[in-house]
Image: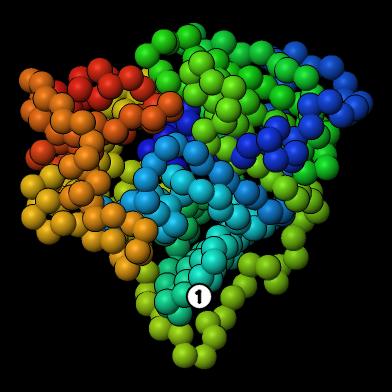
Amino acid sequence: MLRWLVPAGAVGVVALLASGALSADANTNLPSRTAAELLAAVGNAKVAGFSGTVVEKASLGLPELPDIGGLGSSGTGLVGLLSGSHTARVWYAGENKQRVALLDQLGEQDVFRNGRELWQWNSDTRTATHTTLPAGANLTSPAQLPTLNPSQAAQQALALIDPSTNVRTDRNAVVAGRSAYVLVLTPKDGRSRVGSVRISVDGKTMVPLGVQVYPRGSQRTAIDISFTRFSDAIPSDDNFTWTPPAGVTVKQGDTDSPAPKGPIHPGLRLTGTPDYTTIGTGWTTVAKLTGVPSLAALGASNGASNGNPTSKPAGALLGALPAVHGSWGSGRLFQSSLLTALFTSDGRVFVGAVDPQLLYQAAAVK
């Protein structure tokens, strides 16, 4: 989910303070914990199951985007999760029983994992994909349904804790009606556009309930994910089984293809999307995408708006961005308070929550 932002610590959050989902003034009655004690508790948490509703909001200053290189347009796919508000329901009953339902105005996309059986369902296209997973397969997070999960978002942010990060606790809060601790991560590297990451941790289960990312120098969240409803009861087995309705087109998934990069299950193929790699480490990591159309190709075809009347063609959008050049070549640069993206003329894309100079350095690496 939003895996372009994972390396930069900008994975997931909901505008908790603004929406009222998180109240920092509530009396939580939780015992006091230091940051080190809280980190240890999160790392050692053993949860048999939970379920709930997750809301993801992103405000990155992006225009209505067409589909570029199979990444989806605004409102769909990975690009769609970079703007607006999205809701998902999640069920978890162990590493071999999971379900995620991504809800939108047109329908629903679901992933059902039960043992080695994996079903992916799109109610809009009425298509389903069935995959038999390898024995011993771990958690499933298919690329076709980007994960809206504060737990995974928090794990990505916590993985960045090293000498480059200041860690402290803040006032306790209430998230989804549950008392929660609050961890605050602050990058020391001034080249990162992440100002801070706030992680709300359930006081009972130690499951992360919400993650907020603030741009450098801003008091407003840019990306956020939070549970608005959470239950620590183990979901019943009927939540993880699914039978295709009549008239549905069923495809067989391929577990033999090489695995894509990122938090995707090893047996799942990411079809029709660019290759994804990373350059650098920690808060200043840059995501590199190759295999997307070149700027010339997008300009010649004028892109694709996918029938969305408010979505401008890719060529027009990219052509409106400032032109940049250097020893790495030439291209177009997008900047917001948190996210920067470099689209090179030869069909590469570099994305990160970093200052542009780091994108140029990444583009110079062949």
Furthest-bottom residue in this view? 246
187 lies above or below 321: above
Residue underneath mark 1:
123
What residue is at 33 percent from the left and 19 percent from the top?
355
What residue is at 37 percent from the left and 14 percent from the top?
191
Question: Amino acid type of disc 1?
Answer: Ser
Left or right: residue 171 versus residue 319 is right
Residue 142 visible in the picture: no
Position of residue 71 measured from the top left corner of the image (x, y, whole percent) = 32, 53
Position of residue 27 measured from the top left corner of the image (x, y, whole percent) = 90, 27
What residue is at 76 percent from the left and 49 percent from the top?
230
202 lies above or below 114: above
Task: Give the image quarter of residue 234.
Answer: bottom right
* Closer to the camera in the image, 65 or 281: 65
47 lies above or below 280: below
* Closer to the camera in the image, 196 or 160: 196
